[in-house]
Amino acid sequence: MKRIIIIDNKKQAIKDLEQFKNKHYEAIDIEFANVHLLKLNDLINYKLFYKNSLFVRSSTLWEIMQPVGKGGKHHRRLEPKEIVDALFSLKDSINLILIDTSL
C-alpha cells in the first residue's frame, strides 16, 4: 500500500504524520511529494535526483517519531512539524557540504 503526503500543504502534512506517529503501520510506503529535489541537481551540477519525491516506510517514520530508546536504540524523537519543516526547506538549499565517510 502507498500513501502520498504533499509537503507544500504543511498543515495537512503535519496532520498526516501525526497519524503515523500514533499508530505503527507495517506495510505502507510513504511518498513525500513536492520536496523539490530536482533543484538540488542544479546546485551540485550533477543529475543525482530524478524525481521531486522522497520515499520512506511507515515503520521507519513511526520509529523516528517515538521517544528516545534505551539499550542500543539511538534514534531521537522527531516531531511531525520538524520533519515537514526539514523536507520543505530542501527547496531553499544554497549550500551542500561533502562529507568524507572513508574515516
Image: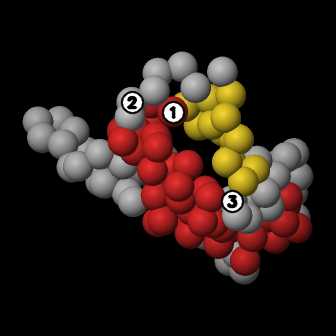
Q: Which residue is mark 3?
A: 7
Q: CA distance from mark 1 to mark 2?
A: 8 Å
User: Considering only vertical position in the picture, is 6 above or below 45?
Assistant: above
Dot 1 corresponds to which residue?
58
User: Is residue 4 rendered to the left or right of residue 73?
Assistant: right
Three-letter amino acid code of the residue under disc 2: His
Q: Are marks 1 and 2 in contact (CB under 8 Å)?
A: yes
Which circle's residue, 1 or 3, is located before the other in the chain? 3
Q: Is residue 54 left or right of residue 49?
A: left
Residue 23 on image: x %, y % = 38, 34
Secondary structure category for the residue under label 2? loop
How far across and how far down the image is residue 10, in percent? 63, 66
User: Which residue shows up at 78% across the image and 57% down it?
Assistant: 34
Where, quadrant-wise, is the N terminus in this rendering?
Answer: top right
What is the x, y in percent for residue 72?
Answer: 17, 36
Of the image marks 3 and 2, the number of the one nearer the N terminus: 3
The answer to which of marks 1 and 2 sits earlier in the sequence is 2
3D distance between C-alphas at marks 3 and 2: 21 Å
Q: CA distance from mark 1 to mark 3?
A: 16 Å
Q: Quadrant of residue 56?
A: top right
Please state which of residues 6 and 47 is positioned toward the viewer in this rendering.
Answer: 6
The three-letter amino acid code for the residue at tag 1 is Ser
The residue at 51%/33% (across/down) is 58
Dot 2: few (<14), some (14–19), or many (≥20) neighbours within 10 Å?
A: some
Residue at which label 2 appears: 24
